Amino acid sequence: MNIFNRETFRGDFTFRNSPAAIRRFPFPFHEDKYMYSVNIEPHLPGPAGSVYEHPIDIDEHYVSEMRDRALVLAEDPKRCQSLPHMITAEWDMLELLMTSMAEGYPELFTLNRDGDKWHWINRPLNIEDRFIFGDATTLPYGPMEYIGRQCQGDFSLQDHRENNLWMDAGIITTQADWSLDFDVGMNFTEWHGPVPLAHQARVFERALKFLLNLQLGQPARRLNWTMTINSRLDTSPENYHKWGTDRMTVTPENVGDKVHLRVELQGLWRLPRSNAVLFSIRCYLIKMSELVTVPKWARRFHRVLKTLPPELADYKGLTRYRDTTVEWLSQYDDGAPTSPGCGPE
């Protein structure tokens, strides 16, 4: 992994360059037909080289993604918001991310602590700061924004009160069709309100019950998915005018390069001082021409997309190009059965 020589940003964020890199992609489908489920498992270390190897995944897009985040925040500072009572949770988040990054990637990040005197070194971004843990005046940004500008993925902080979780802070610049500025201050039930079918299946009721009982030191994770046209991380409502029309540009000739499967690896941690829940949303993109190099994925995704309920296709914004993509994928589906699990054969 080389993250130092990647100078481009707002460029191509897809998994590419080698079969090994493509196989590292967190393919989300365990079956040939998509079914709603809570889909939560312990966030335990996975195989070496996988996106699950470390609690926080740092990859070859690190520098370009951090530059992209800085651009988004410069254009729209409301992508980072925190209500005043969340400051303790912000420090919890900073500690968790710095510790995870330094332990998982010691060649890239170093954290030294002497009581509340901390020394942080980020080599890829050429950052070195000494600060007092708990004193926000010793950092150039608030603690959530400071570390959020240095870690791949989006992050929201949920306050645990009134037997619910409230999205009271977050740094969100790579979201898929939702707005932090709109959702901040909402509870778990409110911000999931627009999702079709899942409420009838009581998916969110069960998920909330699980999350309210999330224990310190026992993080969990899940995968979520949608699709994106072109290699674009920021598909926010605020920037719809920039990317919305891309959905009308898909043709049978360009499906392979334009249409991307977008997967979110979502991590969930109970935080020690605030008792809040940290929710990480790490986005991965893979274009169709890359996905079909793994025959099992090509067969399975063709079947999932073909049988997706219309309500979900509409909610995920796939309606304009789903049929074209299904038809293109059909050439890679020979009807053979797929093996259990979501990994390659």
Image: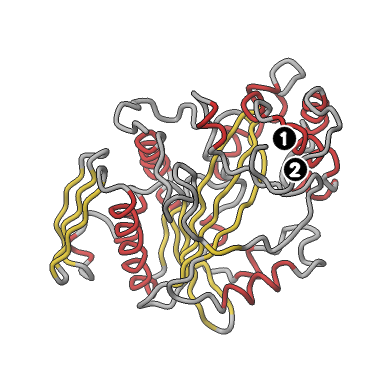
Mark drawn on residue 322 = none
Judge from the rendering whether residue 1 lies leftward or rightward of residue 28; answer left or right: left
Is there a contact, CB below 8 Å, between mark 1 and mark 2?
A: yes
Judge from the rendering whether residue 126 lies leftward or rightward of residue 223; answer left or right: left
| Sequence-earlier tag: 1 or 2 | 1
Query: Looking at the picture, how far across and down is residue 292, in whole percent?
Result: 68, 27
Q: Amino acid at mark 2?
A: Ser
The vertical placement of 344 against 45, above or below, is above
Q: Nearer the viewer, mark 1 or mark 2?
A: 2
Q: Nearer the viewer, residue 89 or 46?
A: 46
- Residue sitting at x 26%, y 48%: 106
- Residue sitting at x 50%, y 32%: 21
The residue singled out by tag 2 in the image is 339
Location of residue 96 (image quadrant): bottom left
- Residue sitting at x 73%, y 31%: 298
Query: Looking at the picture, how far across and down is residue 151, in whole percent?
Result: 37, 49
Q: Amino acid at mark 1?
A: Lys
Q: CA distance from mark 1 to mark 2?
A: 8 Å
- Residue sitting at x 70%, y 35%: 297
